[in-house]
Amino acid sequence: MSKLTWAMIGGGKGSQIGPTHRISAGLDGHFHLVASALDADPERGKAFAIDLGIAPERAYGSWQEMLEEERDRSDRPDLVTVATPNATHYEITSAFLTAGFDVLCEKPLTMTTQEAERIVAITRETGRVCAVNYGYSGYPLVRQMRAMVAAGDLGRIRLIKAEFAHGFHADAEEADNPRVRWRYDPAQAGVSAVFADAGIHAFHMACFVSGQAPREVSADFASLVGDRQLEDDAMLNIRLDGGALCRLWTSAVAIGRMHGLTLQVFGEKGGLSWQQQHPEQLLFTPLGGRTQILERGDAGLSAEAVRASRIPIGHAEGMPVAFANIYHDLADVLRAKKAGRAPDPLALHYPTAEDGLLSMRAIAAAANSAGSGGRWTDI
């Protein structure tokens, strides 16, 4: 089976997310990195691309140059990953989709709901794939949760408790650090900071696992450090269309919380609990019964969890492997498109442009709600 070709925009030397994408895309041998525009500094981006093994003529100084040169090649990339700052996602993603490329965009998909609506429209007009990197949904036991909920193991879902709280922006002395400051600047981050940056992962996971879409939100945003224009702590109540209620807390000032992505799902017949910092175990408590520990890689898990696991039980997998499951899904879908056949149904769990649009609507609604004293606001 030949490898698919892959290109990357952003994620250059020193990037926080770039190495994770390169590890994840290559983990299963599906993708070969053939072209890139890795850095806002053209020469630095070209040099790093050559260090990664990309041919000099396909190491570009800008995404515009890459688009111009790659669009008419017979061996153009099968997938383009966009891992640039948030404010550039719409322009780059829409340009590559329109030119006929399939795209994986880092979250958030865009800065506004209107931009996200346009991205969805482009994917429908062109038939291209546009995925959004809510990579934590690739964890095997998160997919096990989704499968158990869908199978009715918990009965009707009543309540979801979702968190993504850390303390890395709690130091007031660091408030002017450029790596921190931009996240609280509306011109660069949009209408929300910590919810759009961290809490949106918990939001997506709650919808992904429950299989329910959000209807309305009541939100409280707080800026607790310095004179930040956007929130560094948020609490949201979200009513889902299947009748469940989601309580979501996200924070960047929770000192002592290292990562803090957790999800608990409570139904009529049982409850589930998962933590990203301990991703190899899922706690399942049936009504009236004792708590059971489900281990990744164990026998008897769902087909979704089995497909997402690579190494034997007792040997920890991690975040790059979760992201790799998104790339694995996309590889299956892209190969099926090339062959003119239907993809494996288990490959269709990757987050789509529609998921990205839903997230942008949730961010806008939450910001509106917070600005009106927590008024319930339609999503």
Image (spheres, helix red, strand yellow):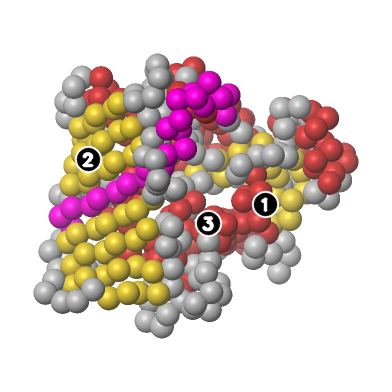
Residue 281 magenta: no
Instruction: Check the picture and name the quadrant holding the N terminus.
Output: bottom right
Kind of residue at disc 1: Arg
* Element marked by disc 1: helix
Q: Earlier in the sequence, mark 1 or mark 2?
A: 1
Residue lying furthest bottom: 299
Q: In the displayed structure, does residue 325 sit left or right of residue 345?
A: right
The residue indicated by pointer 2 is: 238
* Element marked by disc 3: helix
Range covered by the magenta-colored residues: 157-179
The residue indicated by pointer 1 is: 22
Q: Is residue 154 above or below residue 218?
A: below
Within 10 Å of the Cα at label 1, are there few (<14), some (14-19), or many (20+) other Cα atoms? some
Residue lying furthest right: 56
Which of the two residues, 363 or 293, is positioned nearer the viewer here? 293
Estimate the x, y position of residue 47 in percent, counting from the top left: 84, 38
Q: Residue at x 18, y 67 (%)?
A: 270
| Residue 87 in view, yes or no | no
Within 10 Å of the Cα at label 2, are there few (<14), some (14-19), or many (20+) other Cα atoms? many
Q: Is residue 78 above or below residue 141?
A: above
The residue indicated by pointer 3 is: 319
Kind of residue at disc 2: Ile
Q: In the displayed structure, does residue 193 sit left or right of residue 40?
A: left
